[in-house]
Amino acid sequence: MTVGTKAASVKFEGVTKAFGTVRAVDTVSFVVEPGTLATLLGPSGCGKTTTLRMIAGLELPTSGRILIGERDVSRIHATERDVSMVFQSYALFPHMTVLENVCYGLEVRGANAKEVKDRAREGLKLVSLEGYDSRMPSELSGGQQQRVAVARALVLEPQVLLFDEPLSNLDAKLRRRMREDIRELQQKLGLTAVYVTHDQAEALAVSDKVIVMHQGRIAQQGGPLDLYEAPDNLFVADFIGDANVVKGELSRSGARDHDAGPAIAMVRLGNLELLLPHRDVPDGPVDVAIRPQAVILATTRPGRTHLEGTISKAAYIGSHMEYEVSTPLGEMFVIDQATGRQQPRGRTVYITFGDRGVTVVKP
């Protein structure tokens, strides 16, 4: 298979899609580089699926331009684009065998019979389904059906491969395995892929770039690490990975910049003073996002400045504990890996913060 040699960029230039008076996608611009995987992430109704459908040609933009490679496809319908899609529902033909399902798109394109079967079997080999040729979709597990759908899209050797919430029908363990397989396959073949999901962990795990959408617009785009550790706004801070958003007071006076690091300011949270990158936020009241994993709980009063709180809820999740803690800054959600020392409701705890996972949020 030579999928990677055809991989093309995807570019949106000020794209809007309106349905009557409703702008489902509003002036969206982004670039997906060739051979990379970008995820459109956001809650239901944010515009991510409409954006994906415009790449596929299933919807045409109201305004703006869409380019695949150097070609403007804004007014070109789906059948004229070199794009394949893997659907949430698998969309396999129930009366066809696995091999016939994978062959179908190639046959529609008019390839000769030998080439069709050779490429279909190669596609099944790529998704680890060798020997499944004669099985019917009803004889496969959900994960196997999704692999067939991926193989059917891959054999067409598209410039861009699209995934529309491909794992949402699978259980948690299988989702994790399948997302790893999809990422490995994308990198191995050098595919350009655009992936839609509402699952934050899934997006962070598979993506070179994450495009977070909110109410039809892009809230922030960038690498997974950038979005998690430096959210641009409260929506991104809260949507990706959960965050405790608290009020603080920022002051540059007395806080020296690190020689090779970001510009630092003093941020006061209650009686705590933290040195944090100020991210060009002006002095004065500021929102601070605190990741649940960054909160450190102690049952004895630490020797350094701390917040005092009370456990209001506690839940054992297996790999970790989840707590709700009442503090002078408000309720805080805390993830604690120390399952061997579970804290009961009503216990007084003392809170400090780790070196990472606390960030000033831009207004």
Image (cartoon, helix red, strand yellow):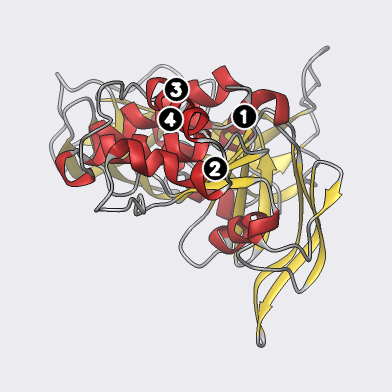
- Residue at horizontal 18%, vertical 34%? 317
Give the amino acid type for the residue marked by disc 3 in the picture. Answer: Glu
Q: Mark 3 points at which residue?
A: 122
Question: Closer to us: mark 3 or mark 1?
Answer: 3
Q: Name the residue under label 2.
A: 289
Q: How crowded is mark 3: few (under 14 residues within 10 Å), some or many (20 or more)?
A: some
Question: Closer to us: mark 3 or mark 4?
Answer: 4
The foreground one among 111 and 188 is: 111
Q: Residues within 10 Å of mark 2 (few under 14, many from 20)?
A: many
24 lies above or below 296: below
Q: What element carries label 2?
A: strand
Q: Mark 1 points at which residue?
A: 191
Question: Closer to us: mark 2 or mark 1?
Answer: 1
Q: Disc 3 and disc 4: Cα gap in Å?
A: 8 Å
* Of callouts 2 and 1, the N-terminal one: 1
Q: Mark 4 points at which residue?
A: 117
Give the amino acid type for the residue marked by disc 2 in the picture. Answer: Ala
Location of the N terminus by quadrant is top right
* Of callouts 2 and 3, the N-terminal one: 3
Residue 175 spot, x, y in % from top left: 31, 36
Most distant residue in the top direction: 259
Question: Closer to us: mark 4 or mark 1?
Answer: 4
Q: What element carries label 1?
A: loop
- Residue at horizontal 48%, vertical 28%? 114
Q: Disc 2 and disc 4: Cα gap in Å?
A: 54 Å
**175 displayed left or right of 153:** left
Q: Disc 4 and disc 1: Cα gap in Å?
A: 22 Å
